[in-house]
Amino acid sequence: MNISSVNRLAQAWVALLLSIALPAHGDDKAESRYDRLWRHAQLYDNPDSGFIQSFALSGRLQADYAWFDADEGDYDDARWRRFRFGFTSQLADDWTVKLEGDFDLNNSPGDLYQRLTDAHVDWQVGESTSLKILKHSAGFTLDGYTSSKKLLTPERNNLTNNLWFTAEYFTGISLSGKLDKRLSYKAGVFASDDSDEWGVTDASYFTLASASYDWATDLGLERARVTLDYVYNDEDRDANTRDFSHVVSLSSQWQQANWGLWTDLSAGDGAFGQRDLWGLVVMPFYSFTETTQLVLRYTHLDSDGDNGLRLNRYENRIVGDRGDEYDEYFAGINLFFYGHKFKWQTGLQYTTMDDAADDGGEYDGWGLTTGLRVSW
């Protein structure tokens, strides 16, 4: 991206903040003003009508500025991080249709469209069970099952980046729901096909099973949830997944008043030359006010052999080779103008990766990421 493009992107961020966020400061009517603005996405809503009961636009717009300086090189750029747009429609008899596309605003107009993300039909089976068919998110690990709209950091942690299937959206069928007030579950079978739309034939499959238990009531906390994820990935070199036959993740989310703690302990059984690996994420956070939040994060990854680990998004632009031991120390500030629907996130991190093979995977450097997140 050239300097003029960076300037235009920066100006767009500033203009949006000045037009929406700053007038709301100290204004008791700010919430209702935001409500009115976001309500424009709801184009139709009549539960008593016939077949189509509601129709709403959906999507997200995310922009990043990233600066990374390491012993091995540097990276400095501003980019549109994500733009997704589509709709959600509620139909009669508890059916829902969602269709959303992924567009790259960094490209020329003729190359904007990238793929379908959510493109599925849901059926609400009773009060607590949902069945999804066709293309939808296959989320596992702490940051893998957390939507990019609700992440507490600008980027997902590198444990998720190494283990999770970062394509995220796969054609499949899944069932989710609650067995009681505390225990919930999700189970699904997905094609690992890398088609930009729907696809089930060009690759193999993987299964996902998750169970979550909620201890909040027992412990007197606002949030106390522990989740166990298990993935079996049928081996296929052409699959749109990571090269792991088995992935297990034990994650937790705890919160009381202004304090919170999220954790993840995960491991993967490598295939096709991919080394086994395990990792730990510890992420405490503190909300000073409803609009200002401090987030800290420590991430450790260890590979059972050489070249089993990859760096995260922006460090990977500097060093594309792999290592065997990784540590990251992160501190960030979140500014919530309208909850997770409109926020500004900034994070500073120090990252190291050892490379016992000494073949180009070593990394030692600082990074700063700041970005706008809008969703509707």
Image (spheres, grey):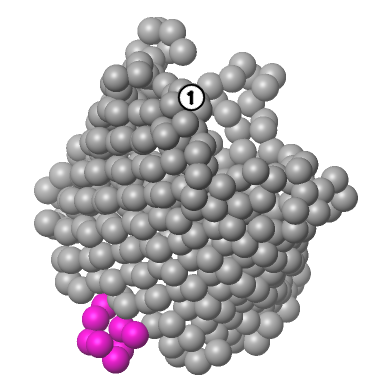
Judge whether residue 374 can be spotted in this image: no
Residue plotted at (22% across, 51% down): 296
Judge whether residue 94 can be spotted in this image: yes
Q: Is residue 45 left or right of residue 220?
A: right
Q: Nearer the viewer, residue 20 or 285?
A: 285
Region of the chain picked out in magenta, as a range: 215-222
Residue 162, percent across and down?
51, 46
Quadrant of the rendered structure where residue 260 is? bottom left
Tag 1's secondary structure? loop
Query: Above or below — where is 323 with respect to 254?
Result: above
Residue 130, percent across and down?
64, 76
Residue plotted at (60% across, 33% down): 103
Residue 205, percent across and down?
77, 58
Query: Above or below — where is 209 with respect to 372?
Result: below
* Amino acid on which the number 1 mark rests in the picture: Asp
Circle 1 sits on which residue? Answer: 359
User: Residue 196 colored magenta?
Assistant: no
Query: Above or below — where is 29 with respect to 124?
Result: above
